[in-house]
Image (cartoon, grey):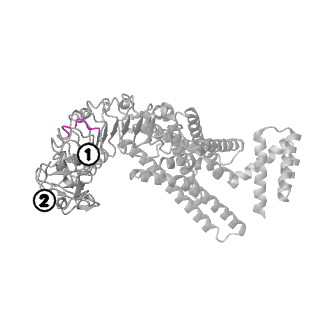
Amino acid sequence: MAKSSTDSSLYSGADVCPLGQFPCGNLSVCLPQLYHCNGVQDCANGADEENCGEKWYVWHLSACVCMFLLCFSPAVLDVFPDVCFCEAGRVNCNKKGLLSVPAVSSNITSNTRIPIVTSGQNVYIYDAVLAVKLAALSTRSELNSNQITALQPDQFIRYRHLERLILDENRITSMRQKSFEGLKSLFFLSLLNNSLESIPKKSVCLEMPRLNWLELEGNRISSLWVSSFQNCTTLTVLNISNNPLTHIYEDQFDMFVNLQSLSIEEVEIPNISIQMFRSLSNLSHIYFKKFEYCGYSPNVRSCKPNTDGISTFENLLANIILRVFVWVVAFIICFGNIFVICLRSCIASENQHHTMSIISLCCADCLMGVYLFFIGAFDIKYCGEYNRHAQLWMESLQCQLIGCLAMLSTEVSVMLLTYMTLEKYLCIVFPFHNYRAGRKQTLCYLIFIWVLGFIIAVIPLWDKQTFGNYYGRNGVCFPLHSDEMEKPGARCYSTGIFLGLNLFAFIMIVFSYTSMFYSVQKTAKTARQSVYNKEVSIAKRFFFIVFTDAMCWTPIFILKILSLLRVEIAGTIILWVVIFILPINSALNPILYTITASSFQEKLKLCLKAKCKQAGLRETSQKVSEVYQNPSPGGFWERNYIFHKARTQNNIHSFFNICLLIFYSILQSEQYNTNR
């Protein structure tokens, strides 16, 4: 093709073309860079159309191409607007917030051919209006991080070859019908972090029949129509996370027969059910807000989150330490309380009504040990496959009953401690008061406390409509934590129990023991040293009673308040509270209210001495006393020898009697240390 002097120039073989021009192969002709790979043979030998690896587009409009352009010649350098810049031979208009196509230089006419730099088949576009004004050969468009507010009908009508469309981080508020008309080849559509409030009722897949991946995370979608996803049979990945969805229909996902990945993170699903995901036979990955939702999709290979801190896919108890210590704590609680019940039953006491209260308290605390035994047993039962049974377990009668058992133990124990504290408060602070509860009155009080505790525990089982699955909120079946899915009636009831009744009881116990200590201290100001020592002993005992109550209930009060304030609480914390914190009182009450009581120790010594005489162990008993009254470095081995000799010589094979003998020696040792 002949060129005018203005369009081409001749050069000798030793020379090079001027800046902005290129040679026509081995010819002595130079042409402007704009003629390279423009689809027209400008060189006589066709060298200008060889090795054209990039795509070229004809500019038919008087507008600037707001994307990466090659800065081939000075004529093209005036094309881009002031907000853009030319960097390393490329015009960059990325993230400039362009709302319309800026004016173009007069040097560019409607027939000017401008090369668009692509990466293989990718075209990077940054303005929605511009997208419809380009030729329909690009396969990827990125319009992210601009201020696009709406997608107009037929916006992409010419983009029949477009495969990827990215509209992330704009301000799109709505999707109209025919907004994606013409995108017959679209494979990937991303609308992350926009302001979409709804999706058209008509299926979005009618306009995009090949759609395989749909990203709708981070919008304001409050509801989804079932018809919105009809005919989406090719969709394999759907992400609707972080949307304020209020309801998901049970058949919402029935159309996704080929769906492999579903993301519903940070979405509450109050009406979740197994039927909701049953039709997703090809689903391999699902992402929820809560681990407990994973129980509704037991056949999915991978579900996230894979733990709530309480349970995992494999085990009811997530932590191996807790899986072991649930048995240890349960054994300590049951053994300690049963031991005290046996001791109190064997030893006659002048204050029978106080003994009745102690035995009743031990029975209530022992129920906590039984609850932990059941949790440990079901953890073993579901070992390795807990997620398959998680939902059935939490809705089962067994979970409801052991949760009811734990609540009964907790509330009866709290009320008994409060009753015993107030009784002691009246005796110490008002010693000349005529009120003293008799046996019948005490029995009536105890029966009333147990009946009230039973009513508190079983009320949530009576009305499922009001309380929902009250005890089955987690794998350990204890209603400690409140969340958005909890029914209002259940939340109010739980708050009334933990922050009403229990908090009031705790305040009463702290106030009563503080008043008792003040009263004892005031009375003993002019007393002798021995009385002072007794006062110190009482103070220590009172301190430990209040301290253990505070250690048990303060974390529970804090957790309950935080959960009501919608503060996210890790499930691990709840599990440690249930296994270690909540049973503290149940484990220590036998020691604090029985074993450390001086009156009980004296009676136990007398009882043990009588048993020693009856069993022919008087000599052994005296020897034990001598050992403790004359301690020596070898005292430990001597005591062991005495116990062994006593057992073998007198044929005392009873485990209970051996425990009594050991306990007697400990009491003797304590008495010796006190006398020193």
Q: Mark 1: which amino acid?
A: Glu
Residue assigned mark 1: 50
Label located before the other in sequence (2 or 1): 1
Counting from the top left corner in percent of width and height, residue 214 is at 30, 40
Q: Could you say which is closer to the camera, residue 121 or residue 463?
A: 121
As helix, strand or loop, the secondary structure at mark 2 comes to: loop
Residue assigned mark 2: 105
Q: Is residue 673 visible?
A: yes
As helix, strand or loop, the secondary structure at mark 1 comes to: loop
Q: Quadrant of residue 337?
A: top right
Q: Is residue 550 left or right of residue 42?
A: right
Q: Is residue 183 magenta?
A: yes
Which range of residues does the magenta coloring cover?
Answer: 180-187
Counting from the top left corner in percent of width and height, residue 191 is at 27, 45
Label 2 Cα neighbours within 10 Å, binned few <14 / some 14-19 / many ≥20: some
Q: Which image quarter holds the C terminus?
A: bottom right
Q: Quadrant of residue 516?
A: bottom right
Query: Looking at the magenta stretch, what is its main secondary structure?
Result: loop
Q: Is residue 545 left or right of residue 312?
A: right
What's the distance in space between the residues labelled 2 and 1, CA to CA?
29 Å
Label 1 Cα neighbours within 10 Å, binned few <14 / some 14-19 / many ≥20: few
Q: Mark 2: which amino acid?
A: Ser
Residue 348 vertical position relative to residue 103 in the rendered view, above or below: above
